[in-house]
């Protein structure tokens, strides 16, 4: 199984020891949500501060063998995956996996169905915030490990309505959920996502310092669990605490 998917499935647990993955072994389990650092394949410098991130996402449109292999060399001590923004074939996925990528985030409209035949590669489906309920119903049975909900790039802050839509999408797929946020989340928004059992947030690696601060703030907040839901998603209030406490 993909190491990242395994780690994603344990979000919210209270392990007695941290799960290490090389240089990205600083645990954010106590923060109750994972932080993924995203960077372009054109900027895969290992000189950046990567410590705050539980895994790295290398964003690329094309799968050039040389570039993917360079990622394998630069990040061989890190847990990393690829965010494919362009067309992707099974051969592309195999190349990434053989180079060291543990997971891949892909657009279902641009991806060959052969990607499902690559063993041990974590598969994460990109889903826009504007996805229709019909599309959710048609894609929910795809054999993917998680979904990545992409917020509107023009969104300055997360509204209550967008949070409700995120939860509706997450409940519709019934899969671990990543949130791709174009900017930095406020602590209230990050806490609301954690309380709503969103599993990970994607942040640009340029915001490493701010991510460290955000993780520390979340760790200082009480951990909570949402009551089981049936047909409707529960939308937490930003300052609401009507949840069950984990002991």
Image: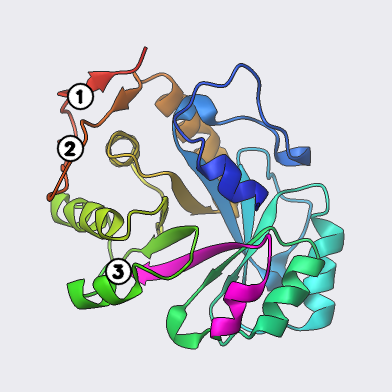
The crowding category of the residue bearing disc 3, from other C-alpha atoms within 10 Å (few below 14, some 14 to 19, many at least 20), is few
- Compared across the picture, whether 101 is left or right of 39 comes to right
Q: Quadrant of residue 192?
A: top left
What residue is shown at x 34% (from left), y 67% (from top)?
140
**Of helix, strand and loop, which one carries label 2?**
loop
How far is mark 1 from mark 2, CA to CA?
Answer: 9 Å
- Residue picked out by circle 2: 236
Q: Position of residue 216 (x, y in %)?
A: 49, 26
Q: Earlier in the sequence, mark 1 or mark 2?
A: 2
Q: Which residue is mark 3?
A: 154
Tell me the residue at 45%/23% (across/down). 219
Q: Position of residue 188 (x, y in %)?
A: 28, 35
Mark 2 burial class by Cα count in 10 Å: few <14, some 14-19, many 20+: many
Give the label, 3 or 2, closer to the camera.
Answer: 2
| Residue 30 position in % (x across, y down) | 50, 24
Depicted 86 relative to depicted 218: above or below: below
Label 3 secondary element = loop
Residue interval drawn in magenta = 113-128
Give the foreground label among 1 and 2: 1
The colouring scheme, among rainbow, by chain, secondary structure or one colour, is rainbow
Residue found at x 60% / y 77%: 115
Q: Is residue 127 above or below residue 157?
A: below
State the mark number for residue 243.
1
């Amino acid at each position: 199984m993909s190491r990242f998917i395994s780690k994603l499935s344990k979000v919210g647990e209270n392990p007695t020891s941290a799960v290490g993955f090389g240089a990205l072994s600083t645990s954010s389990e106590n923060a109750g949500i994972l932080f993924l650092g995203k960077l372009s394949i054109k900027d895969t410098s290992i000189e950046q501060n990567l410590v705050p991130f539980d895994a790295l996402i290398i964003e690329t449109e094309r799968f050039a063998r040389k570039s993917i292999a360079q990622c394998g060399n630069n990040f061989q001590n890190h847990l990393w995956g690829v965010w494919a923004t362009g067309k992707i074939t099974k051969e592309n996925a195999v190349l990434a996996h053989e180079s060291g990528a543990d997971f891949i985030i892909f657009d279902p409209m641009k991806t060959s169905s052969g990607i499902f035949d690559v063993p041990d590669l974590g598969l994460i489906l990109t889903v826009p915030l504007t996805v229709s309920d019909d599309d959710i119903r048609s894609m929910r049975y795809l054999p993917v490990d998680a979904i990545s909900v992409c917020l509107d790039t023009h969104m300055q802050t997360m509204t209550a309505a967008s949070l409700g839509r995120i939860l509706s999408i997450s409940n519709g797929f019934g899969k671990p959920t990543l949130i791709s946020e174009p900017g930095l989340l406020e602590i209230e928004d990050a806490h609301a996502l954690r309380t709503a059992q969103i599993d990970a947030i994607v942040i640009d690696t340029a915001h490493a310092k701010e991510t460290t601060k955000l993780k520390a703030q979340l760790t200082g907040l009480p951990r909570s669990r949402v009551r089981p839901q049936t047909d409707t998603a529960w939308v937490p209030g930003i300052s609401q605490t009507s949840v069950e406490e984990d002991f």
